[in-house]
Image: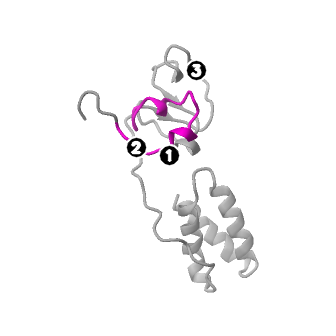
Amino acid sequence: MGFGEVMDHPWDEDALCAVCPGQVHDPGRFDVVDGPQPGCRYDSTTGYRREAASGVPVCIHPERIGVRPGRYASAGERWPAPTSSGAAVGPMPTDADALAGWVTALVRHAGPGRVDVVLGDAEREAARSFPAEVVVEALRAALSAL
């Protein structure tokens, strides 16, 4: 990328906090943590949160930026590649062996911050048709795929 070129950010900047480092930094140039952390304070000189010890910019809302928490700038973790959600998820299967795949697909289609709602809805729907053991195994499979 040359001087003056701007990278297209993979997130919706309108969904970010006004003080998110994602407003001014590209992917991988800041860390993402799950909520406010000790040692990460807003820095009025930069306009975003920074880790006090290292000065690394920090986003505290992984659900808004759309990636899992990680030490992308401070420890060189690889920024997650965008994934395709694939085709729309169909109706709940009638076969118990297909339930885990269905719940996993629902989770993969869930928007940022919606996995808990999607899992709750899927659990209630599946519990009407399948034994508890089958539902729990399907939920475990979906969570392990995150």
Q: CA distance from mark 1 to mark 3?
A: 21 Å
Mark 3 is surrounded, within 10 Å at the Cα level, by few (under 14), some (14 to 19) or many (20 or more) other residues, namely some
Asked where in the image residue 102 lies, by quadrant, the reply is: bottom right
Marks 2 and 3, the one that precedes in the sequence: 3
x then y, percent, for residue 39 = 58, 22
Residue identifier under label 3: 42
Kind of element beneath mark 2: loop
- Whether tag 2 and tag 1 are in contact, CB under 8 A, the answer is yes
Residue identifier under label 2: 79
User: Which amino acid type corresponds to the residue marked 1 in the rendered image?
Assistant: Val
User: Which amino acid type corresponds to the residue marked 3 in the rendered image?
Assistant: Tyr
Kind of element beneath mark 3: strand
Question: In the image as oriented, which residue stretches furthest toward the bottom?
Answer: 95
Residue identifier under label 1: 67
Q: In this picture, which residue range is highlighted in magenta?
A: 7-29
Q: CA distance from mark 2 to mark 3?
A: 23 Å
As displayed, is residue 106 above or below residue 25?
below
Mark 2 is surrounded, within 10 Å at the Cα level, by few (under 14), some (14 to 19) or many (20 or more) other residues, namely some
